[in-house]
């Protein structure tokens, strides 16, 4: 009952648009404190969230903004599998790594530089100028090497970019684990899905129960199973033995995802926080991805409108730019007032779109041209949200 849609870009459009909403959810999660309490609260799942000033369900829903990162990880595995594994040919590792570097690193480095002065100022205020002079350059080196999700004590510049350190592990492992997972069929594939999901969640739960997991939340190995589940979803969906689903099946999957989401929001105070952040919602994400990419539902058509697709393409920029933009904006004017917060969101979204067209895409093309390589990825398929 899985789907094997064609390779046209149209089939990816709903997922592209969905990335915008996932990235925007992260932005709201990280910045809503400015509107509710008049102060910035870091996006830490162990920190009481500013949304607790809102009505009960709204509070719980907004406090789950961090789960979007797991969605990005799963979608990353799914898209990479479609782009590189469907033809079942060996992956040219050199070309693959160059393509991933060209897609991710330029804007990552630019936003790291943007936030560097604010990281220095914050640490100098918290500790001392001397300490900041010693610590911030070291943090910068660790982050430029994409090691900050492993060496968490040396992170802190544009903190949401820890997920790119995790993605680096996924990219390095993909040419090895991707083909192996893609070849699984039948019982072996479903066994792998169960083992990855249940085993991954059991490890996170056990670790967080017996140890203080808070400093290790970003460690990439805790998220690798979610990335692998995305590969398996693509393998199942594009299996040559698969049948195209009927529209009612896609609608049923969307309804199940919606009901499950409401249930998770309601019970979230009793679900271990680290499991919420480390992929326990993967089944919901898999339902969404399958339903929106396998059948032309009303929702898929709505998410395929051009302006939403553009916002989806710019979601990577939105994710990386929203903290540096917040720091820049707050150095000029507080965004505690609703009008200022709305202006901040509008400017950040606008800058992310401009960044995609005038920074990300040109730099990516330049890097690829420098290595005399034309990627198998289309611009859209390559624009994987991080």
Image (spheres, rainbow, N blue to C red):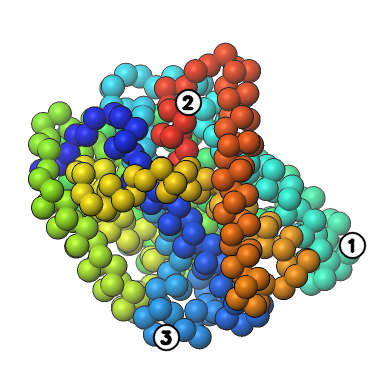
Label 3, label 1: how far apart the Cα atoms are: 44 Å
Name the quadrant of the N terminus.
top left
Asked if residue 12 is positioned above or below residue 277 in the image, the reply reads above
Picture disc at residue 130: 1
Camera-side residue: 215 or 207? 215
**Is 140 placed left or right of 193 in the picture?**
right
- The answer to whether one can see residue 223 in this image is no
Residue at the limit of the structure toward the top, as seen here: 372
Camera-side residue: 205 or 53? 53
Q: Which element is circle 2 on?
A: helix
Q: Image quarter for residue 9?
A: top left
Q: Give residue 28's position: percent from left, percent from top.
A: 52, 67
Label 1, label 2: how far apart the Cα atoms are: 42 Å
Tag nearer the camera, 1 or 2: 2
Q: Which element is circle 1 on?
A: helix
Picture disc at residue 55: 3
Q: Image quarter for residue 119?
A: bottom right
What residue is shown at x 23% (from left), y 52% (from top)? 298
Q: Give residue 71's position: percent from left, percent from top.
A: 39, 53
Check disc 2 and report the residue beneath it. 96
Mark with earlier residue (2, 3): 3
**Is 364 placed left or right of 81 in the picture?**
right
Picture disc at residue 343: none
Asked if residue 222 is positioned above or below residue 81 in the image, the reply reads below
What residue is shown at x 79% (from left), y 50% (from top)? 137
Q: Give residue 20's position: percent from left, percent from top.
A: 45, 52
- The answer to whether one can see residue 31 in this image is yes
Mark with earlier residue (1, 2): 2
Label 2, label 3: how far apart the Cα atoms are: 47 Å
Q: Which element is circle 3 on?
A: loop
What residue is shown at x 26% (from left), y 33% (from top)? 182
Numbered-mark total: 3
């Amino acid at each position: 009952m899985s789907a094997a849609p064609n390779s046209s870009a149209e089939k990816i459009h709903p997922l592209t648009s969905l990335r915008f909403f996932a990235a925007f959810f992260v932005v709201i999660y990280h910045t809503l404190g400015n509107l509710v309490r008049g102060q910035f609260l870091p996006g830490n799942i162990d920190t009481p969230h500013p949304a607790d000033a809102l009505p009960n369900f709204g509070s719980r829903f907004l406090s789950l903004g961090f789960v979007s990162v797991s969605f990005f990880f799963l979608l990353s595995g799914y898209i990479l599998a479609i782009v590189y594994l469907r033809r079942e040919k060996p992956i040219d590792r050199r070309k693959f790594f160059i393509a991933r570097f060209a897609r991710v690193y330029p804007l990552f480095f630019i936003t790291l530089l943007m936030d560097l002065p604010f990281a220095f100022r914050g640490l100098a205020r918290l500790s001392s100028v001397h300490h900041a002079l010693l610590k911030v350059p070291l943090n910068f080196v660790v982050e430029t090497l994409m090691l900050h999700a492993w060496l968490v004590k040396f992170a802190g510049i544009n903190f949401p970019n820890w997920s790119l350190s995790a993605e680096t592990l996924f990219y390095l492992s993909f040419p090895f684990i991707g083909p192996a997972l893609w070849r699984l069929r039948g019982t072996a594939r479903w066994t792998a899905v169960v083992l990855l999901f249940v085993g991954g969640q059991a490890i996170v739960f056990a670790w967080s129960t017996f140890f203080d997991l808070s400093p290790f939340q970003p460690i990439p190995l805790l998220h690798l199973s979610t990335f692998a589940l995305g590969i398996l979803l693509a393998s199942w969906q594009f299996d040559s033995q698969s049948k195209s689903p009927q529209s009612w099946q896609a609608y049923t999957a969307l309804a199940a995802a919606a009901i499950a989401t409401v249930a998770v929001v309601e019970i979230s105070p009793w679900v271990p926080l680290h499991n919420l952040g480390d992929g326990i919602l993967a089944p919901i994400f898999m339902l969404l991805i399958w339903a929106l990419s396998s059948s032309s539902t009303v929702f898929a058509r709505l998410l395929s409108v051009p302006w939403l697709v553009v916002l989806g393409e710019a979601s990577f920029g939105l994710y990386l730019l929203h903290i540096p933009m917040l720091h820049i904006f707050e150095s000029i004017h507080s965004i505690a007032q609703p009008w200022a917060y709305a202006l901040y969101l509008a400017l950040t979204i606008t800058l992310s779109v401009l960044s995609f067209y005038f920074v990300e895409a040109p730099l990516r093309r330049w890097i690829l041209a420098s290595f005399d390589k034309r990627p198998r990825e289309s611009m859209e398929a390559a624009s994987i949200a991080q």
